[in-house]
Image (tube, grey):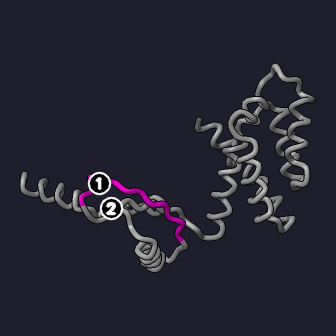
Amino acid sequence: MALSGSAARRYAEALYQIAVSEKAVDDFALSLQNLRQALGGDVLRALRNPGIPLRARRAAIDAATAGEPKAIRSLLDLLLDRERVELFPQIATAYADLVERRAGIVKGRITTATPLSASDREALIGRLERSSGKKIRATFAVDETLIGGAKVQVGDRLIDSSLKAQLDELRRELAS
C-alpha cells in the first residue's frame, strides 16, 4: 500500500507541476474531483477488468474526460496503458492535499464530547488559526467517552484537553 501511495504522490506532483506551468491549478483540482466521483466504484472496476477490451475501456475514458484538461486525459490514458487506473482516486486525493499544503492550509481533526454549534466551530477554528499561524481545514467528530473538553489534531500535533485525559493523568499521579 505504501508503494501505491508513493506512486500516487509522484503522479500528483507531476500533474501539479503541469498545472502550475499552465496556470490552471484550481481547474485541475476541480476536474480531478469531478472525475474521481464519476470514475468511482463499478466504473473503476470495469476500467480495471481485463475481460473488457482495451479499446472499449479507452473509449469510456475518452467519453468521461471530454472537455477536461489535456494533461488529465493523458494521465488517465497512461494509467490505463500501464494497468494502474486504480491509482486515480489516490492521485486525485494526493493532488488536493498538495494544493492545500502549497496554499498553507493544514488539516485538523477536532473531537469533542458533545456536538458543537456552527458558531462554536468557527470560533474554535479561528482560535486555532491565530495560535498556529496557519489556515486550518477542520473536520469534527463526537466521542462521548471524552466526558468533556476536546482533542485537537492539527497536522501531526495532538492536543488532548479532554476531561478523560485529565482524569487519566490524575490517576497516574495518584498511583505513583
Which secondary structure lies at badge 2? loop
Q: Is residue 163 left or right of residue 64?
A: left
- In the image, residue 64 lies at what x, y percent? 85, 44
Q: Is residue 123 above or below residue 113?
A: below
Q: Is residue 57 above or below residue 36?
A: above
Residue 132 visible to the viewer: no
- In the image, residue 149 lies at what x, y percent? 28, 65
Q: Quadrant of residue 30?
A: bottom right
Residue at the disc numbered 1: 144
- Let me know if residue 89 is in the magenta part: no
- The magenta span reads 136-147
Q: CA distance from mark 1 to mark 2?
A: 7 Å
Identity, as a three-letter code, of the amino acid under mark 2: Thr
| Classed neighbour count for the residue bearing mark 1: other residues with Cα under 10 Å, few (<14), some (14–19), many (≥20) | few
Q: Is residue 131 above or below residue 139?
A: below
Q: Is residue 48 left or right of residue 107?
A: right
Which residue sits at x=13%, y=53%?
Answer: 172
| Classed neighbour count for the residue bearing mark 2: other residues with Cα under 10 Å, few (<14), some (14–19), many (≥20) | some
Task: Give the farthest residue toward the top.
Answer: 51
Give the mark nearer the N terminus: 1 vs 2. Answer: 2
- In the image, residue 23 lies at what x, y percent? 84, 68
Residue 143 visible to the viewer: yes
Which residue sits at x=73%, y=42%?
Answer: 88
5 or 42, which lies in front?
Answer: 42
Residue at the disc numbered 2: 114
Which residue sits at x=25%, y=63%?
Answer: 148
56 or 8, which lies in front?
Answer: 56
User: Mark 1 near mark 2, Cβ–Cβ under 8 Å?
Assistant: yes
- In the image, residue 112 lies at what x, y percent? 34, 61
Which secondary structure lies at badge 1? helix
Identity, as a three-letter code, of the amino acid under mark 1: Glu
